[in-house]
Amino acid sequence: MKNVVFIPNIDLGNDRNKPYEYSIKSWRKFCDKYDCELLVLDELLFPIEHMKITWQRFYLFDLLEANNIDYDQILMVDADTIVHPDCPNFFEMTNHEYSAVVNNGSFEWVRHSVDSFSKELFNGEVPFDIWEYINCGFQIVNKKHKPFFEYVTKFYDENQDRIRDSIEKIQAGTDQTIINFLLRQQNIEINYLPIAYNLQDLFTKQLLYFNEQCWWPDELIFDNCGYVFHFNAIPQNDMNRDAAYWIERSYKEFYG
């Protein structure tokens, strides 16, 4: 049985997903290197008004079965990532547990999101510490986690109006914070991987060159800072270098 890399990449008609082709190319090279299978979700399972793409990925096990794909472990990864050519085989680091990386970006955002979704959906309780909060852009699972994914989709079905209203009201994530709550509700053991495997918020880490006043060179200085680069939370900047710019540039400089 092979390990699988699963990437949602759906064209919603606004060209936002165009740069994600470089992400997929980088993950295809990872799969070739370590004999994994690449699975791309490129069609909506439900109308976007009913369920955001981030929630639709939790039908992963149904998609694998529908495509007759046998598997050992699955990486569910966001399409705004680039994997480094020298990335080790992280599938060997999971102990076959639910594996992820702590959210190593804005703690203010995490705190606001956790406190707000707690009040809206979880009776004001927070069963984990902020520094244990995982980022859902890189999650490794296996067959024993199928019941949890079924629990997630059932939770959405039973609470979809409240969830959609909360997402609109809070404006701090769609599925990620709720998943952090559900993982603890179901007592899922989490294997924390180093931040190198989901290096987030590169802008606030001062790893992106975004104006001429930057004291560091206009180079990919994050090259030796991690293995999976997540181009999220990049604000407007003087050079208009958004996620699309950095995804394409990183792929071309890493892979030629």
Image (tube, rainbow, N blue to C red):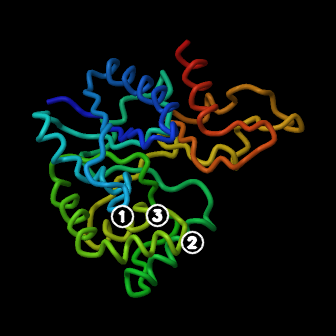
Please rate how many residues cluster around mark 1, counting C-alpha atoms within 10 Å: few if below 14, some from 14 to 19, many from 20. Answer: some
Please rate how many residues cluster around mark 2, counting C-alpha atoms within 10 Å: few if below 14, some from 14 to 19, many from 20. Answer: some
Residue occupying the point 45% across, 40% down: 13
Q: Is residue 56 left or right of residue 214?
A: left
Q: Amino acid at mark 2?
A: Arg
Residues at marks 3 and 1, CA–CA distance in whole angstroms: 13 Å
Residue 201, image x and y in percent?
61, 48
Residue 141, image x and y in percent?
26, 47
Q: Amino acid at mark 1?
A: Ile
Residue at mark 2: 111
Q: Amino acid at mark 3?
A: Glu
Residues at marks 1 and 2, CA–CA distance in whole angstroms: 15 Å
Question: Is residue 111 or residue 197 the one in the foreground?
Answer: 111
- The residue sitting at the bottom extreme is 123
Badge 3 element: helix
For the residues bearing labels 1 and 2, Cβ distance under 8 angstroms: no
Q: Earlier in the sequence, mark 3 or mark 2?
A: 2
Residue at mark 3: 132
Please rate how many residues cluster around mark 3, counting C-alpha atoms within 10 Å: few if below 14, some from 14 to 19, many from 20. Answer: few
Residues at marks 3 and 2, CA–CA distance in whole angstroms: 12 Å
Residue at mark 1: 179
